[in-house]
Image (spheres, rainbow, N blue to C red):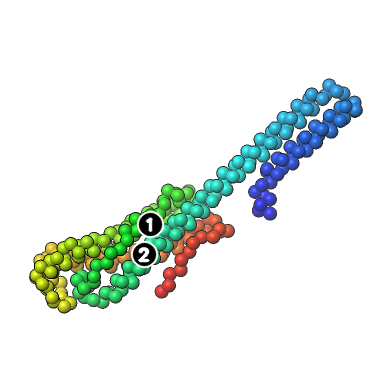
Amino acid sequence: MKAWNNYKPEFLGVLIAVLALNVWYLSSLTIEHRVIPTTYDYIINAIVVISAAFFGSYSAYFLSDKKEQTREYNKKINSLNSALFVTLRQFNALMVIKRELVKWENDPSRFINMPPRVNSSYSDLKIDLHGIDFLLRESNPNLLLELAVEQERFESAIMACSMRNDFHYKELQPALNAINFNIQNPTIQQLETAVGPKIAGTALKSTENVFSHVYLTHDSLSKIHSQLYKTAKELFPNETFIIFEPHA
């Protein structure tokens, strides 16, 4: 029934055009057998030709319009799924990092004990906000803003990890090696005494930044992914969208 409704205008246009051509053919026979005066021949032929042209154009217009609507519809579906896929990958990326951080959650000396790790830049994980800007008109406009904020949060979390890694490799470890630092599980005061307040303070702050950014963004990404999925299903209930159910 849905398919019939989608193409009903084109079908009717073609049907009427065919009927019009049949009328023209029968009218020619009628005129030939002098059922009506031959002076009407040109008028009937003109009406039939104009009608056929009109309904043919009518059919072509609606067919073209229908194709454009279908193309726009599919574009929206693909854009939503793309955004859902990106948020899912962002969540997975932070989940991997969080699994490593959990090991150091309760370590009071994690600012020095937690080793640096090389992470991907994840530069390809960007939500195409332009592709889903129709949400401003067709759904909750705040959702687009929330997605933009979430993208920035993810980038900040990855940057926090990268900055801590660079600091450990380029400043903290060289400073520790230079003085043969060998205190196990030092306090921040002991580290400050050994390498100075600037390096010790940066070690502490950069580590805390990693934990706060990764943990908070990990949770908020899960929520925004679910919210985007819910909105997609509300707008297009008959379509299939990517959904991720994180395990506890």
The residue identified by callout 2 is: 93
Residue 131 position, x and y percent, is 45, 49
Q: Relative to 23, is 219 on the left or the right? A: left
Q: Are marks 1 and 2 in contact (CB under 8 Å)?
A: yes
Residue 106 position, x and y percent, is 26, 76
Q: Relative to 185, is 122 on the left or the right? A: right
Instruction: Estimate how packed mark 1 is, as few (under 14), some (14 to 19) or many (20 or more) residues with alpha carbons within 10 Å.
Output: some
Residue 68 position, x and y percent, is 56, 44
Q: Residue at x 39, y 65 (%)?
A: 92
Q: Relative to 81, is 171 on the left or the right? A: left
Q: Quadrant of residue 217?
A: bottom left
The tag earlier along the polypeptide, 1 or 2, is 2
Q: Quadrant of residue 204?
A: bottom left
* Position above or below: 64 against 233: above
The residue identified by callout 1 is: 125
Residue 44 in view in this figure: yes
Q: Secondary structure at mark 2?
A: helix
Q: Going by the picture, which residue comes out furthest to the top?
A: 39
* Position above or below: 48 against 1: above
Q: Relative to 239, is 103 on the left or the right? A: left
The amino acid on which the numbered mark 1 sits, given as a three-letter code, is Leu
The amino acid on which the numbered mark 2 sits, given as a three-letter code, is Ala
Q: Residue at x 51, y 54 (%)?
A: 77
Q: Nearer the viewer, residue 243 or 224?
A: 243
Instruction: Estimate how packed mark 2 is, as few (under 14), some (14 to 19) or many (20 or more) residues with alpha carbons within 10 Å.
Output: some
* Position above or below: 83 against 51: below
Q: Secondary structure at mark 1?
A: loop
Q: CA distance from mark 1 to mark 2?
A: 10 Å
Q: Residue at x 45, y 51 (%)?
A: 132
